[in-house]
Image: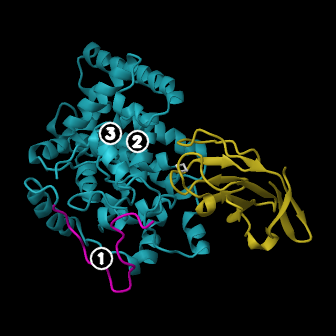
Amino acid sequence: MPRDYSLIGPDAQRAVDAGLVTEDWYRTPIDRKQMKALMRRADQPAIRDTSILFGLMAVFAGVGIALMPSWWSLPFWLAYGVLYGSAMDSRWHECGHGTAFKTRWMNQAVYQVASFCMIRDPYCWKFSHARHHSDTIIVGRDPEVAIMRPVVALKVAANLIGVPDMISGFRLMLLHAAGRIDPEEAEYLPPMFHAKTIRTARIWVAIYALTLGAAMWFQSWVPVLLIGLPRLFGCWHMVICGWLQHGGLADNVTDHRLNCRTVYMNPVSRFIYWNMNYHVEHHMFPLVPFYRLPELHRVCAWDFPEPCHSFAEGYAEMLPALWRQRKDPDFHLRRPLPATANPYQDTPAA
Amino acid sequence: MAEWVNACAINDVDEEDVIRFDHGDRTFVIIRDHEDNYYCTDGMCTHEDVHLEDGLVVEATIECPKHSSIFDCTTGEVETPPACENLCTYPTKVEDGRVYVEI
Ligand code: FES
């Protein structure tokens, strides 16, 4: 069946008619006391990680600047880029959920910085991500589908260097700065936030203008290597993790075990990605903070499909499915559940 | 005409926790904060049709289990988006180990 991912196209209504716009998603039963303990917030893990993150960014950028124009500066800029273009994505995500820190202003502060780095308006993306959680991979409803079907390999690959994302981010920022809201965004962004979006975009345009101006004034790459460009050359880690979240799995279902994937990753990737590799767990219970997702994963194991044990295993599972989805958009993976699990909920239960 | 309704025993709700309370065809939550104050609000979040019974209570606030909007339990005021509308709150009193709600 052809798919129209526009939020204002025919599939949006089709999803409503099919009963897919519903709160009736499957949730693994968990004892309330245990759930409360899993949702409990703390500041310490996120303060530690945020200090390490910004500390490393300062060191990599500092060494990168000191070694310029030698090619020896390159690895430091690449490392800085990954923290800017990929780690900021997960900080944007966790702080947007309000789960990273216990103290609310800390979530807000990191969220604003990370939104700027990712060129995502903090208000639009707050609501877009809420929609992604309400209607995960529901065609015509979810504004954050990373891999659309039929899969166009080149388009997907272009995301590795952030080109489509960056173009879209700048287009929307300039549109907002001109006082306008994109019609698709207006689908989920309440009018009371339009003015904030417009004001934010104007501040960001001023920052980018200053950055560009400084680069030209000093005849130096440093300003744009610090701000803006790393969104391009550093986003690859976000992308290779992000594809695994839902790639090759079902769409138009109401069970996150069918449309999300959990993948075990190495500690460095988990630091950059802030444990979002536990993606089924995160979607089913979004109030559980990143540092308790491994524990939640153990609690849910009886009811979840076996996770992929590495990046390699995840890609070995996903890539053939994506290849097939170029020609057959209805094809998707359906992983077996353990014998102890409740059956999959393909359609709303009610 | 509002009436005082016997909603639950005080120990039915743990400290900093929430339970669901249905009355007639309406649904509410009874919330107990960290200082043993009890509150009653509408059961459904004002953002989407999600029940707050699975939410997270921190001091005198409740966070929606779906998209993390936080509401002040004393006033129902929404403190963080995506919810934009306040929750309705209802007066409560504790008598003889029971929580009563005026609805
Ligand atoms: S349903 Fe409560 S915040 Fe979205």
Q: Which of labels 1 and 3 is toward the front?
A: 3
From the image, tell me which residue sits under label 1. A306
Instruction: Give the Cα distance between marks 2 and 1.
Output: 29 Å
Instruction: Say which residue appears at 24% left-offset and 30% top-offset.
Output: A167
Residue sitting nearer the eye, A148 or A224: A148
Q: Which chain is yellow?
A: B
Q: Which residue position holds label 2?
A: A128
Secondary structure, mark 2, is helix
Provide the letter of the chain coloured cyan: A
The amino acid marked with disc number 1 is Glu
Q: Are marks 2 and 3 on the same chain?
A: yes
Q: In the rendered structure, does residue B16 fall within the stretch colored magenta?
A: no
Q: Nearer the viewer, residue A106 or A179?
A: A179
Classed neighbour count for the residue bearing mark 2: other residues with Cα under 10 Å, few (<14), some (14–19), many (≥20): many
Q: What is the CA distance from the residue labelled 1 to the residue labelled 3?
A: 33 Å
Examine the image and state in which quarter residue A188 appears: top left
The magenta stretch spans which residues? A331-350
Q: Secondary structure at mark 3?
A: loop
